[in-house]
Each structure stands twice: as C-alpha cells, then as structure tokens.
Image (spheres, grey):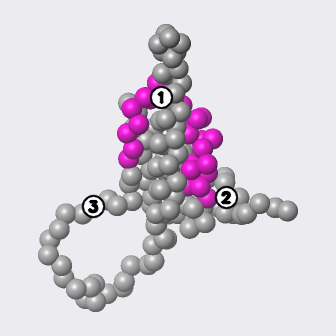
Amino acid sequence: MSYEFSDLSLPLQKVIDLGEIDRWLRGVAEIVPQRCAAPPEDDDDIPSAPDTTAHNFNTHTLYFGNSHLITTRDIERMVGFRQLLAAASQHNIRVDVDDMGGGQMEVSFTPDESFSRSRIFGASYSNVLPVLFGQGPRL
C-alpha cells in the first residue's frame, strides 16, 4: 500500500511550497511601504541619535527549498503575487522580485522610485502604468 503514495510526494511537496510562497507574498503585500516624502531641507531639525547600524527594512527574503519543483511562472500565477503588484502599484513605489536561486526569493521595495522602474524576475515594468494594477474589477 505504501507504494501507492510514494509517487505523490513530489507533487504534494510542490503544493505545500506553493501555499507557503503565496502566504508569504500576501503578507509582504500588506507591509508595502508608503512613498518617501522629500527629505528635510535643514539637518539641524533632526535630533542627533547614537551611532546605529543601518538596517534595510525594505528587503524581504524567503527560502522555500524545493526550487527544482517551482518555476517563476508558478509564482506569477499566485493571488499573493498579484496582490503584491497591486499594492506596490497603488503606492506607486518600485518593487523588485528576484529568484536568488537555490530556493530563495527576494522582494525589495524602493519607496523613492516609481512603480514603472520595477523589475520582476528580470522583466522591466517600464511600460506598465500603475493604474492597470490599482484598478478594481470593471462591471
């Protein structure tokens, strides 16, 4: 009887990994940063802070492990992926999505650049208007 389930392990693992990626993308879509405002003109208004290490809070990385099972085409079909693009489009900020290889994916936001500068899995979005992703369904 166990031989009947052995063939299901790879497709089942792919479904599990796709669910994890989609859930992660939906979560990242909820934390899309707002567009950066112009920096203050006078640095004297900024209180001095102790020296700290700068952290990049606009880059998020996911390790999903089974990279041989999942293609970028699979990821592009996910609802979470579309939600991420719609959120970045609505805020008009640049979002870069990269397949880092080895089962790692990275999403980076650049709030001071427009959505049209985005690069998704190497493809440029320079000809895509942010309005196309930000609109609701037409009735």
Amino acid type, callout 1: Gln
Q: Residues within 10 Å of mark 2 (few under 14, many from 20)?
A: some
Percent x, y of residue 10: 49, 22
Q: As displayed, is residue 115 above or below residue 96?
A: below
Q: Residues within 10 Å of mark 1 (few under 14, many from 20)?
A: few
Q: Residues within 10 Å of mark 3 (few under 14, many from 20)?
A: few
Q: Is residue 128 magenta?
A: no
Percent x, y of residue 69: 50, 26
Q: As displayed, is residue 136 above or below residue 62?
A: below
Residue 122 seen in this snapshot: no
Q: CA distance from mark 3 to mark 1?
A: 34 Å
Amino acid type, callout 2: Phe
Query: What residue would you read off at disc 1?
Result: 13
Q: Is 2 situated left or right of 79 in this image?
A: left
Query: What residue would you read off at disc 3?
Result: 55
Magenta extent = 61-86
Q: Is residue 69 magenta?
A: yes
Which one is earlier in the sequence, the residue at label 2 or at label 3? Answer: 3
Q: Is 78 situated left or right of 107 in this image?
A: right
For the residues bearing labels 3 and 1, Cβ distance under 8 angstroms: no
Q: CA distance from mark 1 to mark 2?
A: 31 Å
Q: Residue at x 28, y 89 (%)?
A: 45
Q: Residue at x 41, y 37 (%)?
A: 64
SS at badge 3: loop
Q: Nearer the viewer, residue 20 or 29?
A: 20
Query: What residue would you read off at disc 2?
Result: 133
Percent x, y of residue 77: 63, 41
